[in-house]
Image: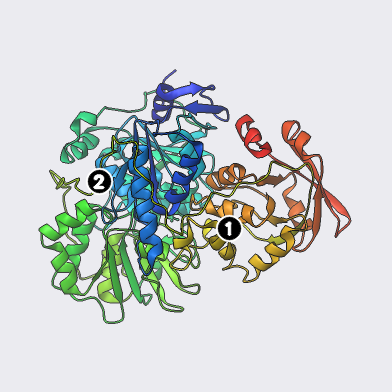
Amino acid sequence: MGKNIVEKIMESHLVSGKLKEGSLIGVRVDQVYTQDATGTMTWLEFEAIGLDRVRVPLAVSYVDHNMLQSNFMNADDHLFLRTAAARFGAYFSRPGNGICHQVHLERFAAPGLIALGTDSHTPTGGGIGMIAIGVGGLEAASVMAGMPFEFTMPKVVRINLLGKLRRPYVTAMDVILTLLKMLSVKGGVGKIFEYGGSGVKDLSVTERATITNMGAELGATTSIFPSDENTLRFLKAQGRQHQWIPLEADEDAEYAEIIEIDLSEIQPMIAQPHSPDNVVPVKDIKETKVHQVCIGSCTNSSYKMMKTVSSILRGRTVHEDVTLFINPGSKQVYEMLAHEGDIENMIAAGARILESACGPCIGMGGAPGSGQVSIRSYNRNFKGRSGTKDAFVYLASPVVCALTAIKGEIVDPFETDISVEEINEPESFKINDNMLISPKKDKDIKIIKGPNIKEVPVKEPLENTIHAQVLLKLGDNITTDDILPAGTQVLPYRSNIPEISKFTFKNLDENFYERAMNAKSKGGGIIVGGENYGQGSSREHAAIAPMYLGIKAVIAKSFARIHRANLINFGILPLIFVNPEDYEKVEQGDILKIIDLISGVKGSQKYVIFNESKDSSFEVYSNLNDREKELILN
Ligand code: MIC
Ligand code: SF4
């Protein structure tokens, strides 16, 4: 029987288990990378494991999230990361070098490899034909310590692309927004999307990477494209042609499902507030007044897209009601734009050029005004993520964003008097790795820890009985941004759990922290959620902070993959309603009792929950694999 691309790569990396949908497998990992917001914890965890050096062929520590330096905290964290990378044998990508996913794609990603990153948009690397998966910090630390990466083999779904995009008006961003409209933010849970078909050759590596990047918003484990002539062209332009191998699915490869998309039928699309799947054609909401436009991020900062934006802005002025921010995703692209006069075009038009980092995407600067409309070429528009609770954030292609910045209202590229130029991919990129510090040989380097770097908190082993109060009852699609917000006030505490835990659920419930602290000595707390609990980010802090506050279990209808793994890693039981209707049987404030947990985890994984406040009971289950059972018990 023929094989698909995912099977080919997994098979060549398999160390345990059977390569079969739904079974637990272990694979060897070639590359691991971290970013600063998740990386400080990851490197503390790696240090706690007690090894001298990383045991993977390549590890990279990037700095791109916490960039605003209004006091010592972020600067101290960067120093910790630099010295830890030097001490443990990882590359260090200095602040200013760019956003981890884009820099990794440009300088390290290669077809046929497996990479893990402590960030949910790690699948960006799928654009080059690599299996790239976002994980929590402890997962990454264990793998860097030489363990295989163990996970349940997802379904492989083929996305068959046909035809060609109607360039330059329709872009890769419109492809993934179309998929989000079709499949929703839950549509990819438990799946890997493998792209194929005659339309693949119409897309360059960076366009493919835009699509795999935002596959994270579908909830997919990852997404991957074949490695072909376009992949070779990109690697050549990056001076890395020796890393090319061809990779495609066999003719008779099998898939769990096949979805067909005709690229020539795709139109400019836009995600409306407050979810990336709330997608409509741009023409349906054209002329909506806009106050802010943000272009860049790890989703849409390729050379080609940035040059397109520059050409739209050339000789024009940003509308007087609009603030335009541009954050190029990598120093490489930034330097080329500067060299070729594009930064000059942007500045002349009135754009506010930011450093090459996440910036407004994660609410680190550039928050919109109260009730204002912001349109962004980014990947997430969850409520409050921008830093402004009542802002309205839309997501669209850089083309739509740039045209909108000029007109002051949402523009359909097919209907405007501004002509959009078609830009070609570059023959060669400007290669200058001076902001990447190579691993050091010296093992005596001292790791420098400022006052913001605190210990990793550790939980007691699982107790046999949980007798606790429901501290919060929530609906569907709760994001990690809801659980633990980002932004200028919170993000700098990522290395400091006692401080950051004060912000747990703060945007949803002002008093959560106080309630949790009160309940902590009285048996702790339980959270109740709906479907897809914990979607979004890989930040394990969204599990560590609740653990620190005494949360013992989360009961939900279903969980997002990375957050579920993070809960287990930090000893919080993820429990699922056997009958989803039983969700109605619990209220905030109810006292619940769950008994015989230890034998339950080891055995049937079914548990009866007694709701003492309602004098009723209902059933839940956990679906832990053997490795997860061990983690939860210990
Ligand atoms: C995000 O886009 O939500 C982030 C910020 O990059 C997160 C990581 C984090 O919370 O540090 C992610 O995607 O995993
Ligand atoms: Fe950074 Fe935004 Fe990309 Fe996350 S999605 S890595 S915050 S640019």
The image quadrant where one finds the C terminus is top right
Q: Position of residue 396 (x, y in %)?
A: 36, 61
Q: Quadrant of residue 497?
A: bottom right
Q: Quadrant of residue 505?
A: bottom right
Looking at the image, is 274 positioned above or below residue 596?
A: below
Residues 462 and 237: in front is 462
Tell me the amino acid under the disc marked 1: Ile
Looking at the image, is 437 positioned above or below residue 602?
A: below
Q: What residue is pinned by disc 1?
A: 478
Which label sits in the foreground, 2 or 1? Answer: 2
Distance in Å between CA atoms under marks 2 and 1:
36 Å
Labelled pair 2, 1 in contact (Cβ < 8 Å): no
Left or right: 514 as drawn, with respect to 183: right
Tell me the amino acid under the disc marked 2: Leu
Q: Quadrant of ligand 2?
A: bottom left
Mark 2 Cβ inside 8 Å of ligand 2 = no
Q: What residue is pinned by disc 2?
A: 436
Q: Residue at x 63, y 47 (%)?
A: 558
Q: Position of residue 285 (x, y in %)?
A: 40, 70
Left or right: 399 as drawn, with respect to 600: left
Asked whether residue 112 appears in the rendered view, the answer is: yes
Q: Describe the element under mark 1 as helix, strand or loop.
A: loop
Q: Residue at x 45, y 69 (%)?
A: 387
